[in-house]
Image: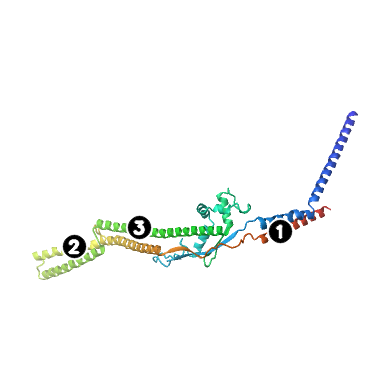
Amino acid sequence: MSLQVDYAVHDAEKAARSTVNDHASVLKHGRTSRILGLFFTKRNSLIFFVLLPSLISAIYYFLIASGQYISETRMVVRTIGISEQFDASEKRDGRSIIGGDSLTQDSYIVANYLKSPQIVRRLDAEIGLRSFFSKDATDALSRLPSDASFEDLHEYWVEHVDTYVDGPSGIIIFTVRAFSPEDSVAITTAALAASDEMIDKISEKAKKDLVTRGERDVVASLEEYRKALDDLRDYQNKTGILDPTSSAKMASAIIAKLTEEKLGLTVNLKSLEAAKAGDTARGRQLRRSIQALDDQIQLRQNSLAGQNTTNETQLSSSLTEFSRLETRRIVTQALYEATVRNLDTAKSAALKRTTFMAVFSNSHAPEKSEYPDRFSEWIILTAGLFTLWVTATLIWMSIEDHRV
């Protein structure tokens, strides 16, 4: 009986504590809601989320933000002395310092270099590029931190320069933003000098590579020509025949002469046989002479061509191998002569061709700051904040309506 009473008392105390906790939670939530309702009314939210940030941005743009001066330069990359043509096997127009077909390609090279880390590193070493963007007179939000890394400096440089290449004409428009007119002009001048030197280096390397390749082709073709001559000379020494064609003509002339002599002796022998004197000493001598001439004629004919021969220097076989070697010699000689002409043309083109960067609109110290556009940027920021506030307010009101 007492156990049941204890359980009843325990349940009552637990229910009382739960009621107290729920009441405290309701009171706490109510205070939080009243505080939020006090600060986040439509009027207060408009003040905190639109008017106050707009006022702060106006103070920054119109009173604090440092003016930036834009220096603009217009230039073009040109190559002169590009009309030379190489041998018929390889024609080059030479329109680009790297072998391309358009001057616009050179312009894109310069434009890309003006935004590269290499030019940032060079300008920082030559004119102290970092110091131009880290001056104490520049506002804290616009200037480059004094302890910025090189990667930060390069990123800052890319944000403050702009390049545009007009495709048809190849004209490059290069702009630089700095915090004083003198700084913008100084940076632009140093950047253009670095770009001009880069163009000169690439042009010189292109010309050197052109001549080097021509010299390498000449050396290779000369080696092939020498090898063809050596093979032909070795074959001539091996066979003992300088020119199979001339040897064949000579052998044919000898065969004709021997045949003529044989015919004369045969006529004399027939005359003796007709006179019943074929068995005389004169007749026997004529037969031996005719047989000797037949052997010589057969030997000469076998040296020219034939199947039943043991002559290792048969002219028909020699003529085939000699023709192959001679053809190879003629081809390699023609290739060698062509590469020599190409090398002469390459040297002439290298001497005549010059690639340079021509500036036709120099940068001048700007008279007024064009960046930032204070009023426009302030209006855009304010309009954006107001649009976000209206959107958020409509969403919140829709949620409250659904709760009711």
Q: Residues within 10 Å of mark 3 (few under 14, many from 20)?
A: some
Q: Is residue 149 above or below residue 112?
A: above
Q: Are marks 3 and 1 in contact (CB under 8 Å)?
A: no
Q: Mark 3 or mark 2, which is nearer to you?
A: 3
The answer to whether one can see residue 312 in this image is: no
The answer to whether one can see residue 351 in this image is: yes
Is residue 60 left or right of 129 when viewed as pictured? right
Q: Where is mark 3, residue-wise?
A: 219
Give the quarter of the image for residue 23: top right
Q: Nearer the viewer, residue 267 or 151?
A: 151
Mark nearer the N terminus (1 vs 2) = 2
Spatial CA span between label 1 and label 2: 119 Å
Residue 296, labelled with which disc?
2
Q: Amino acid at mark 2?
A: Gln
Q: Amino acid at mark 3?
A: Val
Q: Could you say where residue 232 lies in the image, as x and y percent from the top left?
A: 29, 58
Q: Could you say where residue 343 lies in the image, as x and y percent from the top left?
A: 37, 62
Q: Identify the residue shown where x is 21% and y is 65%.
A: 250
The mark tally for this picture is: 3
Q: Where is mark 1, residue-wise?
A: 382
Question: Secondary structure under badge 3?
Answer: helix
Is residue 336 left or right of 367 when viewed as pictured? left
Is residue 4 left or right of 390 when viewed as pictured? right
Q: Nearer the viewer, residue 332 or 145?
A: 145
Q: Residues within 10 Å of mark 1 (few under 14, many from 20)?
A: many
Mark nearer the N terminus (3 vs 1) = 3
Q: Could you say where residue 124 lies in the image, as x and y percent from the top left?
A: 52, 52
Q: Amino acid at mark 1?
A: Thr
Question: Secondary structure under badge 2?
Answer: helix
On-image quarter of the N terminus: top right
Mark nearer the N terminus (3 vs 2) = 3
Is residue 60 left or right of 299 when viewed as pictured? right
